Image: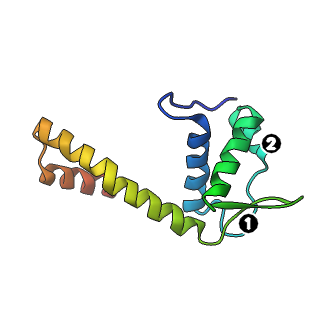
Amino acid sequence: MATTFSEDRAIYLQMADRLCDMIIDGTYSENNRIPSVREYSVSLGVNTNTAVKTYEYLSRLEIIYNRRGMGYYVAQGAKDKIVSSRRAEFMEKTLPAMFKEMSLLGISIESVVEQYNQNLAV
């Protein structure tokens, strides 16, 4: 069964995000093997070339590395690198856009904090 991808971002980047999510949540830990390119492409129902592009991208970012003949592994420090990068992006891009939307809609920071706390309680 093919996975659904959004149309606003390249599929290989969405696939990279999914692998990074699994590294952050501990599904794949440092120096442990991740699925082969073929396994990953089949599991998501995408072309193998797209998975190759994903793995090359993550390799360039030093999130994963290839052991010749053995497959791809999570690089040392990958989780910290991903979290640091995502936090920076959140602070520089997501929050400013959110604050602008809050201002336009008249949403107070207090109501956001209240909603945040409600979501934590769930």
Residue 32 badge: 1
Where residue 22 appears, x then y in whole percent?
A: 60, 55
The total number of labels drawn is: 2
Relative placement, left or right, of 40 versus 6 is right
Q: Residue furthest front?
A: 60
Q: Amino acid at mark 2?
A: Arg
Where residue 82 appears, x then y in whole percent?
A: 52, 61
- Quarter of the image with the N terminus is top right
Q: Amino acid at mark 1?
A: Asn
Disc 2 and disc 1 in contact, CB within 8 angstroms: no
Relative placement, left or right, of 106 versus 87 is left
What residue is drawn where x is 64% and y is 54%?
Answer: 58
What residue is drawn where x is 14% and y is 52%?
Answer: 109
Q: Residue furthest right?
A: 69
The crowd level at tag 1 (other Cα within 10 Å; few <14, some 14-19, many 20+) is few
Residue 72 in sight: yes
Where residue 38 appears, x then y in whole percent?
A: 80, 42
Image height of 7 relative to 89, above or below: above
Q: Secondary structure at mark 1?
A: loop
Query: Which residue does the numbered mark 2 point to in the structure image?
Result: 38
What residue is drawn where x is 25% and y is 49%?
Answer: 96
What residue is drawn where x is 52% and y is 66%?
Answer: 81
Camera-nearest residue between 1 and 14: 14
Q: Secondary structure at mark 2?
A: helix
Image height of 32 relative to 94, above or below: below
